[in-house]
Amino acid sequence: MVKCLCYRSRFSQQMKYSFCFFLFIIILFFSNCHSGKPEISPSAKEVVLEYINGVIVGKYYDKLPLLLSDDFVNELSPKFRGPSNNHIISQGLDAHREHLQSLHHERDISVKILDVIQEDNIVVIMMLVTHSYKDGRKATFPWAGFFTVEDGKITRARHIHDTLLEYIQLNEVSR
């Protein structure tokens, strides 16, 4: 009986040392994880969210100069071709303002943000977008955007959405 208690005592002492060593390794690992890399500022994510909520949904075009660089490029994957065949929708601040105004002229846009991920100066956002047209038609589809933010302004936006699903809901393509 005494031998058994000693064994348990020795075992629990070894477990304590093992646990402390394990904790030390974990703390050491996480403290060195970001050494050598600049701290990721939440500002890139905030800039993109302000662009989506303030400009795309809210139609506050006066925010564009605060959120976009002068040489901003907006790219969309061409319809039914996939993400490798990007083409430029608008280039420059004024051209993008005109593009958005033409979109908003024919439809209202609402979004439900599903996920936002930031890595350094790249922000990826996944949303469900709803276009409500003036003629009463409505379409909801998944949308993914990839934004590059430099010096607190978006320099490039690449996005892809399910145009086939959008066109089916708008009765522009038959099932």
Image: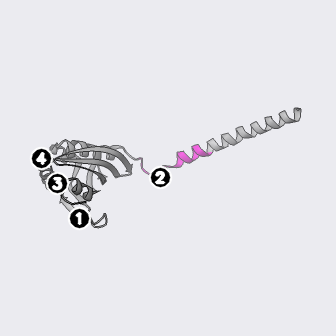
Counting residues from the start of the chain, the first of labels 2 and 4 encountered is: 2
Dividing the picture into quadrants, the one containing residue 19 is top right
Tags 2 and 4 touching, CB below 8 Å: no
Report the magenta residues as a range. 25-39
Q: State the image coordinates of residue 74 (x, y, percent, origin top left).
A: 23, 57
> Badge 1 is on which residue?
87
Number of the label disc, if any, that sits on residue 105: none
Nearest-to-viewer mark from 1 and 4: 4
Residue at image position (16%, 42%) is 60
Look at the numbered disc 2 and give the secondary structure of its residue. Answer: loop
Measure the C-alpha gap from mark 3 to mark 2.
37 Å
Q: Quick check: 80 above or below 125?
A: below
> Badge 2 is on which residue?
36
The amino acid type found where label 4 is placed reads Lys
6 falls in the magenta region: no
Looking at the figure, which quarter contains the N terminus? top right
Q: 159 and 161: which one is in front?
A: 161
The amino acid type found where label 2 is placed reads Gly
